[in-house]
Image (cartoon, helix red, strand yellow):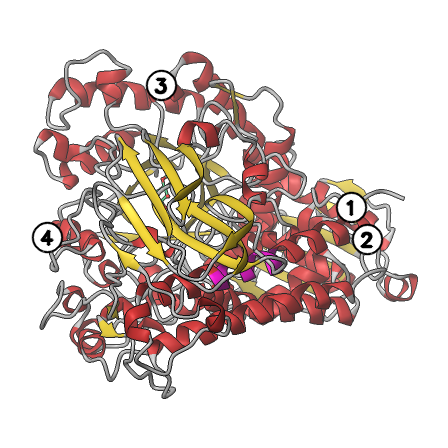
């Protein structure tokens, strides 16, 4: 028996039961209307041959000609080749670019798969195979067209083989500074992407390295493009803005300098010689330390248009210019400062100033792929300049594929949002499709962190997000439940129990994660300084990144109103702006995104904010405990190998959700402890804290110090702290005036660790002192003295009676 490694993903084409496969007709031949072995039409035919063998056990031969007498054949071709071979096209409705026609009951018992272009043909073949693989033999004669022409993915792969925010092993594209030689995995990825109608992949990190332009890497790009082209997947690349200076040896990278323009024109011509169907360039500039046009006192449009002009002579390549431009040294003491305003502030006035082949790539929310955000207001502020929405299949802030969060419901919520541009229906799906504002080229992209792991993404269940992304980009009205059911049948089997349980876990996964991480629109509450993993509510303030909660002892939340806050609500069209400006009409799940309120503020549910925090964290963690139990019911119904791997991950998630629960609840309990004693709020472990007294001195630069007293007993004391890039800090912990430990926190030490080992620590960085005897009234004092870093490094301390979970 072969082990199901997960490598084939949803394309494993498991054999149907004899009862099912015998019910299907036998095919006499596959007729492929293209003899070029590298064309997607030919690939489609091979895929049909392979799939029908595996799913139905039928061995079927290839032919290249459509003859009048062919009966019981499967015909695959483009509209053009099909009609010139004499195929009947009169029933085929209008097909858009990449669209296809699938008729499973054409004349003479034939199946007709006809693409508007070559990609359409292969999409149609996959559609047919995926129906069969689900045991679905219902006759169909219909056309399918994409909602938008741009349906890309962005890998954040570095040339050294690492992947930014990658959780599934090293890159399949690069190793040791070079494009890899073996294209096997790359072609396998192209097959998966093609099957969900993704038409392009940007292969390198947006934090790009100009060495991608070395001769050997250009040859490498040639190899990648050749490996993916037969599947109808084109490639694009991310550029480093200062390449002319740093790679080309020019004195400047000023976008208005003619020599810089020549340099980009030349290098672009060189790239096209290697990759004649390059899909375009992705640019991250003036963002998180990256250089860009602003570095040279030029506008963002000046920068984008320079690349647009370089691409123009070579075909239909586009510049995907990222709107993720913001100041990451923001001063939180200024109440008006707000990173959420940045995209509109930078781009709104440039509307219409970008060349025709520039698309502004906008992250779906105003900050950064948090567990919940409102949609980015920039999606309603560009009229003439076209846009693409950027999603993130990589679960950077959503548990990094150690937790499972199925994102289709989140994406649907954003795409279904009505921006009410000019008081008219303006669903985001209709903005990005181009329909609402009359754009001819726009659409979707997503960050994808595929790696060389056999699960591709680090968690078998998380592959459903890639599948769902493709489905939704094609048809944004795709139903998240049907999508996960379909994916499950293809990936794990047709048994109803399998489908029901996986659909249940998936549909519950986002609300559950939101409950035990950050709810009410406060953001994910993970470590945001470096890892973006694990609970670290304290890191949300006092940083320059502008991902703030403005939590103090009495109140919490960003004030983004026009009346008293940063004015962010005013960036939305009038009707939406009015809704968010008013606390009464702001939904509870975005309350703290738009409003700064006392912890006693009552939600629409009647609960106070702080009580909701506590309860939701308990509910979320309790619910996460059900996932491994539900999964256990699948033992024996699916293969053991994948069963065990998923079981392990869900068990880990269940455990870590408790860490989340307690960390966040203790943090806010401690934050407002003085004040809490005066009201009815509680944590369910509250009694153990007794009359905790927490004195916060410097949270800002200098020494961080917390002092607490608590009842006599033996405790495990866990100190969670951050390390800072480029900094180290010395910590001392003392009890009743006696030193019980000291250590140095150093980022470099952590980087030396195997990442998985680090994750097993369950939290950012934690030092635990066990079996510490405490007398009532002893003073516990923890002092962190930063050296060279800007912030106080202490996060939170959990003090639990010995023997209880920590
Ligand atoms: C590639 O950099 C990333 C960075 O790792 C990530 O933490 C943040 O979400 O966004 C950046 C971006 O989108 O550019």
| Whole-percent x, y for residue 337 in the image | 14, 55
- Give the mark, 4 or 2, whose residue is nearer the N terminus: 4
> Which residue is under mark 4?
349
Q: Pick whichever, 272 or 749, lies toward us.
A: 749
Q: How far apart, in angstroms, are the residues tagged by discs 1 and 3?
A: 42 Å
- Determine the quadrant in which ligand 1 lies: top left
| Quadrant of the frame with the C terminus | bottom right
Residue highlighted by disc 3 = 270
In whole angstroms, how far apart are the C-alphas of marks 3 and 2? 48 Å
Q: CA distance from mark 4 to mark 1?
A: 53 Å
Local crowd at mark 4 within 10 Å, few (<14), some, or many (≥20)?
few
Q: Is residue 516 visible?
A: yes
- 724 in the magenta segment: no
* Residue 761: assigned label: none
Residue 654 colored in magenta in the image:
yes
Task: Report the residue at 55% width, 44% height from top.
Answer: 761
Label whose residue precedes the other's in the sequence (3 or 2): 3
Q: How many marks?
A: 4
Q: Quadrant of residue 218?
A: top left
Q: Mark 1 Cα within 10 Å, few/some/many (few <14, many 20+)?
A: some
At horizontal 45% and vertical 73% (from top left) the residue drawn is: 683
Label 3 element class: helix
Q: CA distance from mark 4 to mark 2?
A: 56 Å
N-terminal of the pair, mark 4 or mark 3, is: 3
Which residue lies under the disc numbered 2?
639
* Comparing labels 4 and 3, the label whose residue is closer to the camera: 4
Q: Position of residue 9 (x, y in %)?
A: 67, 48
Per the rendered image, the range of residues in magenta is 653-662
Q: Badges 1 and 2: C-beta atoms under 8 Å apart?
A: yes
- Of pointers 1 and 3, the one earlier in the residue sequence: 1
Front one among 226 and 692: 692
- Residue identifier under label 1: 4
């Amino acid at each position: 028996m072969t082990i199901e490694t997960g490598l084939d993903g949803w394309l494993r084409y498991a054999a149907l039961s004899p009862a099912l496969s015998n019910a299907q007709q036998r095919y006499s031949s596959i007729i492929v209307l293209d003899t070029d072995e590298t064309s997607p039409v030919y690939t489609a035919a091979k895929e049909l041959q392979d799939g029908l063998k595996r799913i139905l056990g039928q061995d079927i031969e290839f032919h290249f000609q459509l003859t009048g007498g062919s009966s019981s054949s499967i015909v695959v071709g483009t509209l053009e080749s099909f009609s010139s071979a004499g195929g009947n096209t009169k029933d085929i409705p209008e097909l858009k670019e990449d669209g296809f026609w699938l008729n499973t009951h054409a004349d003479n018992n034939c199946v007709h798969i006809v693409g508007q272009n070559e990609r359409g043909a292969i999409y149609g073949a996959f559609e047919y195979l995926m129906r069969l693989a689900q045991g679905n033999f219902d006759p169909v004669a219909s056309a399918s067209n994409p909602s938008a022409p741009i349906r890309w993915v962005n890998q954040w792969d570095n040339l050294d083989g690492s992947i930014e925010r990658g959780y599934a092993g090293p890159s399949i594209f690069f190793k040791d500074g070079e494009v890899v030689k073996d294209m096997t995995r790359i072609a396998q990825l192209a097959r998966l992407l093609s099957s969900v109608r993704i038409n392009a992949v940007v292969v390198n990190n947006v934090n790009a390295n100009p060495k991608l332009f070395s001769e050997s890497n250009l040859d490498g790009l040639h190899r990648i493009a050749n490996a993916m082209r037969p599947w109808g997947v084109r490639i694009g690349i991310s550029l480093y803005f200062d390449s002319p200076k740093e790679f080309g040896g020019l004195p400047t990278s000023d976008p208005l300098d003619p020599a810089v323009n020549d340099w980009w024109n030349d290098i672009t011509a060189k790239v096209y010689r290697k990759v004649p169907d390059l899909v375009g360039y992705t640019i991250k500039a003036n963002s998180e330390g990256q250089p860009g046009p602003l570095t040279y006192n030029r506008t963002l449009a000046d920068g984008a248009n320079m690349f647009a002009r370089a691409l123009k002579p070579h075909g239909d390549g586009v510049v995907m210019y990222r709107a993720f431009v913001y100041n990451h040294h923001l001063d939180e003491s200024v109440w008006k400062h707000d990173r959420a305003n940045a995209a509109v502030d930078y781009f709104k006035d440039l509307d219409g100033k970008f060349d025709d082949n520039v698309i502004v790539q906008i992250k779906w929310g105003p900050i950064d792929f948090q567990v919940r955000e409102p949609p980015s207001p920039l999606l309603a502020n560009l009229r003439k300049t076209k846009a693409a929405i950027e999603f993130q299949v990589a679960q950077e802030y959503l548990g990094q594929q150690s937790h499972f969060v199925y994102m289709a419901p989140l994406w649907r919520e954003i795409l279904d949002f009505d921006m009410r541009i000019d008081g008219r229906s303006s669903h985001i799906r209709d903005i990005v499709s181009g329909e609402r504002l009359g754009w001819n080229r726009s659409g979707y992209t997503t960050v994808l962190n595929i790696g060389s792991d056999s699960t591709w993404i680090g968690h078998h269940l998380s592959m459903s997000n890639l599948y769902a992304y493709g489905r939704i980009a094609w048809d944004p009205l795709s139903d998240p439940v049907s999508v996960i059911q379909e994916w499950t049948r293809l990936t794990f089997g047709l048994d109803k129990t399998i489908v029901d349980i996986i659909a249940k876990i998936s549909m519950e996964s986002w609300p559950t994660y939101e409950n035990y991480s950050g709810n009410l629109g406060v953001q994910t509450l993970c470590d945001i300084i470096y890892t973006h993993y694990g609970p670290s509510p304290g890191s949300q303030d006092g940083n320059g990144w502008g991902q703030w909660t403005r939590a103090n002892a009495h109140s919490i939340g960003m004030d983004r109103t026009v009346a008293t806050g940063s004015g962010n609500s005013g960036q939305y069209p009038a009707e939406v702006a009015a809704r968010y400006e008013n606390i009464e009409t702001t939904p509870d799940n975005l309350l703290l995104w738009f409003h700064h309120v006392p912890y006693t503020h009552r939600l629409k549910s009647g609960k106070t904010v702080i009580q909701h925090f506590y309860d939701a964290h308990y509910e979320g963690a309790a619910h996460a405990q059900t996932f491994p139990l539900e999964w256990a019911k699948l033992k024996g119904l699916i293969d053991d190998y994948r069963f065990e791997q998923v079981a392990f991950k869900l068990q880990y998630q269940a455990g870590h959700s408790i860490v989340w629960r307690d960390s966040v609840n203790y943090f806010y309990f401690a934050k407002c402890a003085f004040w809490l004693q005066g009201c009815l709020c509680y944590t369910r472990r509250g009694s153990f804290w007794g009359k905790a007294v927490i004195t916060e001195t410097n949270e800002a630069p200098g020494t961080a110090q917390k002092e607490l007293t608590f009842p006599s007993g033996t405790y495990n004391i866990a100190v969670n702290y951050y390390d800072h890039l480029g900094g180290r800090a010395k910590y001392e912990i003392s009890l009743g005036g006696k030193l019980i430990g000291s250590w140095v926190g150093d980022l470099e030490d952590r980087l030396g660790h195997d990442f998985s080992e680090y994750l097993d620590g369950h939290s950012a960085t934690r030092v635990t002192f066990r079996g510490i005897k405490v007398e009532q009234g002893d003073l516990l004092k923890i002092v962190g003295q930063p050296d060279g870093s800007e912030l106080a490094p202490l996060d939170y301390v959990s003090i639990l009676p010995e023997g209880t979970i920590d």
